[in-house]
Image (spheres, rainbow, N blue to C red):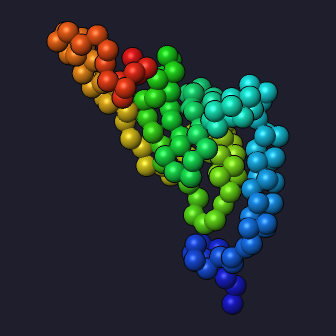
Amino acid sequence: MQEVAADITYHDQPRITAAQRDEVELRARNLLLSCLTPEQRAMYEKEFKFRVVSNLGNVFELHRKRMHGVFKLDMQGNRIEEWCVTPHGRIPVDDILLSQKLMLETDEAALRSESNIWDLSNARLGQQIHRAALQYAGYNHPPDYLQGNA
């Protein structure tokens, strides 16, 4: 009987040694870097994130995280949505990033349909109101969690 890949769970996947894992991670990183533009690569090597323009013209920032690492940006570069989308299983983070990059560049709508999405625009508005209230109350130095989120 033919086994269906969708029936294989995370725990069913074979264990690998640390050396094998390191080799897999290195190959995934090299593949990702080979698919990035020079600008994306420089940003990724410095900040572990890069920006992608989707097939619909939207700009996204992808962070080196297994989950909660896809952010849709507005015209000013502010995060307006957070997308959580990741494949199941033991997949190198850089392979996850590459799959997200390719999906955004070719079919943003399909990736959106598979994502859990949070609207961050109201959170930013809340921070702006909080900052304004603090300034109105005479606080000239907002708390650290409000720094740089104008």
Q: Nearer the viewer, residue 1 or 47?
A: 47
Q: Residue furthest bottom?
A: 1
Name the residue: 69% across, 43% down. Answer: 102
Q: Is residue 56 visible?
A: no
Placement of the C terminus among the 4 image quadrants: top left
Q: Quadrant of residue 106?
A: top right
Q: Nearer the viewer, residue 110 or 14?
A: 14
Name the residue: 67% across, 82% down. Answer: 3
On the image, the x and y values in percent for residue 24 come to 77, 60
Placement of the N terminus among the 4 image quadrants: bottom right
Name the residue: 75% across, 32% down. Answer: 41
Q: Is residue 76 visible?
A: yes
On the image, the x and y values in percent for residue 11 come to 57, 77
Side of 19 where 105 appears, left or right: left
Q: Is residue 12 above or below residue 52?
A: below
User: So how many labels did they put on this image?
Assistant: 0
Q: Is residue 113 above or below residue 149?
A: below
Side of 134 where 24 appears, left or right: right
Name the residue: 70% across, 85% down. Answer: 2
Q: Residue furthest left?
A: 137
On the image, the x and y values in percent for residue 97 come to 65, 46
Q: Nearer the viewer, residue 110 or 43?
A: 43
Q: Nearer the viewer, residue 136 or 105?
A: 136
Q: Is residue 59 above or below residue 3?
A: above
On the image, the x and y values in percent for residue 70 come to 53, 40
